[in-house]
Amino acid sequence: MNRFAKSWMSAALSLAIGIAMMLVLPGVLDDYTLIQVTIYAVMSILGVSLGFIWGFGGILCFGQAAFFGLGAYTYAIAVMNMGDSTGPFLLAIAVPALFAMILGYVIFYGRLSDVYMGVITLTVTLILFNLINSTAGPEWKIGSAPLGGFNGIPAIPTLNVPGHPNDVLSPKDLFDLTFVCLLVVYLGLRMLISSKIGRVIIAAKENEQRVLLLGYDARVYKLFSFTLGGAIAGLAGCLFANWGAFTSPTIFGLAQSAQIIIWVIVGGLGTLVGPIVGCVAIQWLTTQIGTQQMFNSNLVLGTILVVFVLLVPRGIVPTLGSLGEWAFGRMRRRKASSTTAAAQAETAPAMAATERAT
Amino acid sequence: MELALVIVIQVLYAVATLFIISAGLAVIFGMMKVINLAHGEFMMLGAYATIGAIRLGLNLWVAMFVVAPIAVGLVGVVLERLVIRRLYGRMVDTMLATWGLSLLLIGIVTSIAGDTTAGVSAPLGSFSIGAYSLSGYIPVVIAVAIALALAIRWVLMRTQLGLIARGTMQNPDMANALGVSPSLVYSVTFAVGAALSGLAGGLLAPITGVVPTMGAAFVAKAFITVIGGGPAILAGLVGASALFGAINQLATFATTPVIGEVALLAAAIVMLRLLPQGITGRFFKGSL
């Protein structure tokens, strides 16, 4: 990864753009577009969750949609039983996290390789899909919430202000909440990655054997990042259930899992902004395809995936990042040359040392 | 007694089906270490090729056993040249690219044939065992599975082609040094795998609804069977199909088809936890 992408400047830039969008968009967009932007942000959170575990943890999860769907279903079932939405909101994060932890335990402590990891996550997603799909009929219910089978759960109550069940969020509030969640997730992961734990996580991706020999239990770190990814996907699922007040088994489906992977590949593996960019671009494209009859959306998505794997394996953002690196490097050089000649003579050896160190 | 016989036949049928739908994937994965996620779509193409050939007036059996494998084998050759060839040795990238291909094929077929269910009626009527009536197609599927297993074994053990294929599988560099072109072997292997998938699709066309998205129902099961089987192609495939097919069918008898599917998938996860190298990673080592 290049220096610009690692620097705090890129993080600050992304955050500034995010906050600016959050403040400006509600003023300039009509309600319909604002709701569209909200779903982009929800899906971006989901994209970031896979971008983190795959790009930084080295865990290719074919079933990130399972945690997403689990979050949506947990929220729906819990809020229909509990009334107030604070508990369900937290549960929608905790249940997928717990599920990811159990699944991760089986995978990482069984020392299963990449391919088997793919099989197991795929399989679990299909199990959930099959199970939920077959729960149509009034006899399948948890508490007072019917599961609905392939019909899904309609009319899910929206989130409310904690403690006031009648004070539900408006679409504008939901937009704000989603954006705050996205920014918090981004900033949190960014800080995690540059912390010591994050460094071990990345090291375990690069060379698990060496990390083990250095005295770190790579399995614990992988399990941690996988669980965190599950929790974030659950959060996205909860927001998704709020966005449309509806959830159905298709969100467990293979198509959903495939989409998330495409976002990450297109946006750029190994970055956090990449999945967001990829997600927004692909979602926008899918919506545009829906408005015309010429090309089927599967056809276009499939072509994009094949073309990116073959020709742009780095994705959009790292390619743009190289440009940023170039600009960043120029700026640093100019700063260095503006120091006085005398000071330069004194600091030259030190600077050379720093240069070598970086 | 009659019930027991019916159950035995149904279990054999489930095992045979699983074997047939996994064979193409097993050949490609076992020989080339390429995981072909477009496998389900190859089957879908085989099913459409069968239906198309029947509509053109061909005999059902000719359409199924000749047209479908040849058509899909040719598609396999083209895709191997265009895409797969560039990604050898990069397992995850191949998985992603073939996943892209699967979406692409679904899109193309949907654009051409539409999003509706096509189908042919199952031939051969039915036969009865005591009070139970079974489709006459069941013995055909079981017979095809047995014939396929024997044919794979015969080709690999008794022919020049099989010898070259096994050699390339064990040590590509050495095979290359002895004058075999691995790229040609891979090309042929991929075509054979694709043709087997096409045959499976054609064979299943009369008993499943043929829609562009039908592949998704098979790819996961085939994937699990092949991975569960482990490094030996034929022994692994037979072992894993027998295990998973039996679990699936018995759980279906005891409960519902959905629970049967879930039992199969859950059994696969438990088995991979216990035997991370698959069945033939632990037992029957060194067999085919």
Image (cartoon, coloured by chain):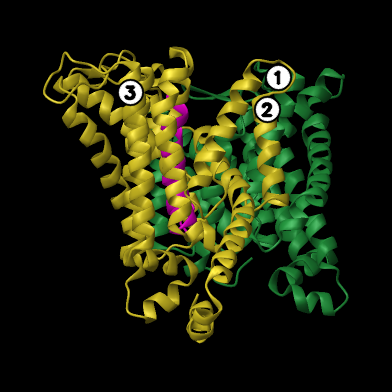
Chain colours: A yellow, B green
Q: Determine whether the residue tagged by mark 3 lies in a helix, strand or loop.
A: helix
Which of the 4 image quarters holds residue B174?
A: bottom right
Task: Name the side, left or right, on which A317 lies relative to A154.
Answer: right
Q: Determine whether the residue tagged by mark 1 lies in a helix, strand or loop.
A: loop
Q: Determine whether the residue tagged by mark 2 lies in a helix, strand or loop.
A: loop
Q: Residue at x 59, y 56 (%)?
A: B92
Q: Nearer the viewer, residue A343 or B189?
A: A343
Which of the 4 image quarters holds residue B204?
A: top right
Query: Is there CB contact under 8 Å for labels 1 and 2?
Result: yes
Determine whether A256 is above or below B173 in the image. above
Magenta residue check for A44 = yes
Residue A120 seen in this snapshot = no
State the CA–CA distance, disc 1 to disc 2.
Answer: 7 Å
Q: Residue at x 80, y 23 (%)?
A: B52
State the CA–CA distance, disc 2 to disc 3.
Answer: 47 Å
Kindly report which numbered mark, 1 or 3, lies closer to the viewer in this rendering. 3
Amino acid of disc 3? Leu
- Residue A174, numbered circle: 3
State the CA–CA distance, disc 1 to disc 3.
Answer: 50 Å
**Stretch of the chain drawn in magenta:** A38-61
Residue B211 seen in this snapshot = yes
Image quadrant containing the N terminus of chain A: bottom right
Using the image, name the chain to which the residue with label 1 belongs: B
